[in-house]
Amino acid sequence: PRNDDASGGGGGGAQLVPLENHGVQLMSLGFVVDEHAPVVWRGLMVMQALRQLLFDVRWGALDVLVVDMPPGTGDAQLTLAQEVQLSGAVVVS
């Protein structure tokens, strides 16, 4: 889902609107890519997608952000640590 209101967010322009149920907001790359198209995510593509999910989604006020990270080299985890001001983290591997 998209909201073309340009206010808020870090990327400017249209923002994705997260799904919400029982007060929990959810956004996934699976919502914005063709479900029948194979997707291979590497390095820069993963980092850009992560930035989009962080800054181009209309999250509103959050107490907690849960991020299910893709397996790989750690590029996504490093991007998350560099791009977001963290006050704490729990890592499950």
Image: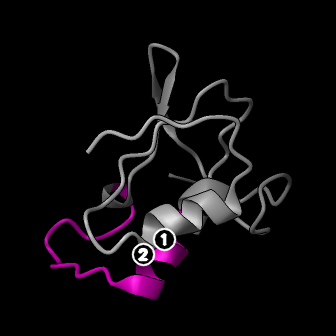
Classify 71 as above or below 17.
below
Give the left or right position of residue 48, taking residue 42 as reference.
right
Q: Position of residue 50 (x, y in %)?
A: 51, 65
Classify 74 as above or below 2.
below
Using the image, tell me which numbered label, if any, was put on residue 14. Answer: none
Does dot 2 land on a helix, a strand or a loop?
Answer: helix
Q: Which residue is mark 1?
A: 49
- Where are the magenta residues, as a range? 31-50
Residue depicted at x 55% and y 36%: 65
In 3D space, how far apart are the residues under numbered discs 2 and 1 (Cα atoms)?
5 Å
Give the left or right position of residue 41, taking residue 48 as reference.
left
Q: For mark 2, does the 10 Å Cα neighbourhood hold few (<14), some (14 to 19), or many (20 or more) residues?
A: some
Q: For mark 1, does the 10 Å Cα neighbourhood hold few (<14), some (14 to 19), or many (20 or more) residues?
A: some
Using the image, tell me which numbered label, if any, was put on residue 46. Answer: 2
The structure's colour scheme is one colour
Q: Is residue 84 magenta?
A: no
Marks 2 & 1, CB-CB < 8 Å contact: yes
Classify 59 as above or below 1.
above
Q: Position of residue 66 (x, y in %)?
A: 47, 36
Asked if residue 57 shows in the view, the reply is yes
Quadrant in the rendering for residue 43: bottom left
